[in-house]
Amino acid sequence: MASLLNQLLHDAERRAAEIAREFASLKGQVPAEVESYRDKMEQRAVRCRDIVTKALSDPDVENPVLAVNYYRDYKDVARLVQSLEHLPLLVLRRFVTVHTPGSSEGPGWPARWAWTVAVR
């Protein structure tokens, strides 16, 4: 169980780091009203990565007796990483695509609608 848990934690750390990088790459590409939201989501992804990194550096992660506790922590972080990937990141990607100068769609209602859904 400990080796499986270790692999799961490494995967969560990698995914959180990739999502944080992607949020960081959107900096300056979104309007000012959306920038604070992008920044908050980037901070959450960085916090997830830091939590998993801290768990991986803990020597007790290899202890089978404590594996259940670490697995619960992994599940919570993995859910948060997945939720960051499936809504905020997706909406911000779409928002950037729609608001890119020269875009064929222009700044029409789909972007405003998507942004409204994301911040609820």
Image (spheres, helix red, strand yellow):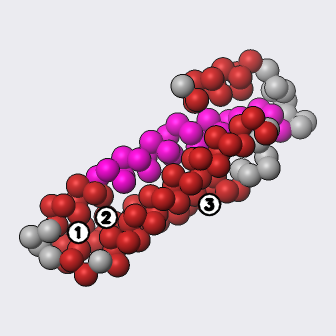
Q: Considering only vertical position in the picture, is 20 above or below 56?
A: above
Query: Residue 109's x, y, as percent?
Result: 74, 18
Q: Which residue is mark 2?
A: 8
Residue 58 found in image quarter: bottom left
- Disc 1 marks a residue whose amino acid type is Leu
Q: Considering the numbered disc 2 on the image, is that residue within a helix, a strand or a loop?
A: helix
Magenta: main secondary structure: helix
Q: Is residue 86 magenta?
A: yes
Do the residues under discs 1 and 2 have CB atoms within 8 angstroms?
Answer: yes
Q: Considering only vertical position in the picture, is 74 above or below 102?
A: below
The reply, left or right, for residue 32 in relation to residue 59 is right
| Gap between marks 1 and 2 measured at Cα | 6 Å
| Gap between marks 1 and 3 measured at Cα | 26 Å
Region in magenta: 75-100
Q: Which residue is mark 3?
A: 21
The reply, left or right, for residue 42 in relation to residue 73 is right
Residue depicted at 64% across the width and 40% down the height: 37
The N terminus lies in quadrant: bottom left
| Gap between marks 3 and 2 measured at Cα | 20 Å
Q: Considering the numbered disc 3 on the image, is that residue within a helix, a strand or a loop?
A: helix
Is residue 97 at least partly visible in the picture? no
Residue depicted at 71% across the width and 50% down the height: 26
Q: Which residue is mark 1?
A: 4
Q: How many marks?
A: 3
- Disc 3 marks a residue whose amino acid type is Arg
Query: Residue 98's x, y, as percent?
Result: 77, 32
Query: Residue 39's x, y, as percent?
Result: 65, 49
Residue depicted at 59% across the width and 47% down the height: 40
Q: Considering the numbered disc 1 on the image, is that residue within a helix, a strand or a loop?
A: helix
